[in-house]
């Protein structure tokens, strides 16, 4: 019985250590994408030996931190109403999604250095599926263009979001203007050729009535 309790205690301790490391990684990398494993271990309150007992490389730590950020982001995006006018739904998705990208832009920079493009796409599969469904519905309702593939339009949205993060980092854009810039750019890109581009922030709704 004592052996079972001891094993359970060790497992609980290990899980606590892993959670502390992943949280510390998200915080440290969120402030500095070049944060070292020593800094992450120190912030987590564990030694490097403990960190390496759970993660064999910096890439694994970054992967775990990015996975955690995306899981939490998905919880936020699950609350966004994507019904109704697809253009308004897209605007609401951008407003919610942009804040997530903005918060995680340094962490994303670390991920882009450590992880393959394929792995980053894999991690973003959840958000991508959500947008694909919205774009598909928008195309069926005539709100979005059908002359370009859905995957391309989704890629355009995420590329513009990530480019906004780069512009902020370079000092050419402020966080409070980013959502408007992204929305205006993406609505223009998604609008069927020959149709008027709706104004961000309500133009789509006014056109519908």
Image (spheres, rainbow, N blue to C red):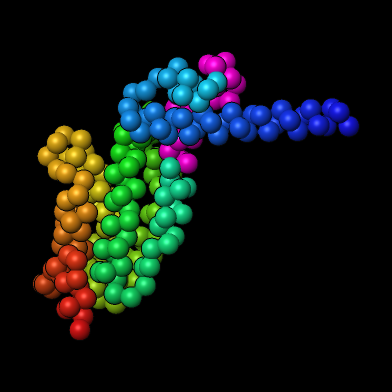
**Horizontal side of residue 44 vs 144, given as left or right:** right
At x 24%, y 73%, the residue is: 143
Question: Which residue is more in the foreground, 137 or 15?
Answer: 15
At x 73%, y 30%, the residue is: 9
Q: Residue furthest bottom?
A: 209
Question: Which residue is more in the foreground, 108 or 179?
Answer: 179
Name the image quarter holding residue 146.
Answer: bottom left
What percent of the width, then of the height, locates residue 102? 29, 44
What percent of the width, then of the height, locates residue 56? 53, 22
In this orientation, does residue 105 appear? yes
Name the image quarter holding residue 63.
Answer: top left
At x 39%, y 28%, the residue is: 28
**Horizontal side of residue 55 vs 137, given as left or right:** right
Q: Is residue 65 magenta-colored? A: yes
Relative to 114, is 108 above or below? below
Q: Which residues are magenta?
A: 47-68
In this orientation, does residue 37 appear? no
Q: Main secondary structure of the magenta part?
A: helix
Quadrant for the N terminus, please.
top right
Question: Which residue is more in the foreground, 96 or 182?
Answer: 96
Quadrant for the C terminus, please.
bottom left
What percent of the width, then of the height, locates residue 171? 14, 36
What percent of the width, then of the height, locates residue 176? 19, 49
Q: Is residue 88 magenta-colored? A: no
């Amino acid at each position: 019985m004592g052996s079972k309790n001891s094993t359970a205690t060790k497992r609980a301790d290990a899980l606590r250590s892993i959670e502390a490391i992943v949280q510390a990684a998200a915080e440290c990398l969120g402030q500095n994408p070049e944060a070292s494993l020593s800094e992450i271990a120190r912030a987590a309150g564990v030694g490097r030996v403990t960190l390496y007992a759970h993660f064999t490389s910096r890439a694994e730590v970054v992967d775990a931190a990015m996975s955690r950020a995306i899981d939490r982001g998905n919880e936020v995006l699950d609350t966004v109403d994507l019904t109704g006018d697809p253009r308004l739904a897209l605007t609401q998705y951008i407003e919610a999604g942009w804040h997530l990208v903005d918060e995680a832009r340094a962490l994303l920079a670390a991920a882009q250095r450590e992880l393959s493009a394929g792995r980053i796409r894999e991690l973003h599969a959840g958000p991508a599926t959500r947008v694909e469904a919205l774009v598909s519905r928008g195309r069926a309702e005539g709100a979005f263009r059908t002359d370009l593939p859905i995957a391309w339009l989704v890629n355009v949205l995420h590329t513009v979001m990530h480019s906004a993060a780069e512009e902020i980092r370079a000092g050419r854009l402020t966080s409070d203007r980013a959502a408007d810039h992204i929305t205006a750019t993406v609505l223009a890109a998604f609008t069927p050729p020959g149709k008027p581009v709706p104004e961000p922030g309500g133009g789509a709704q006014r056109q519908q009535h």
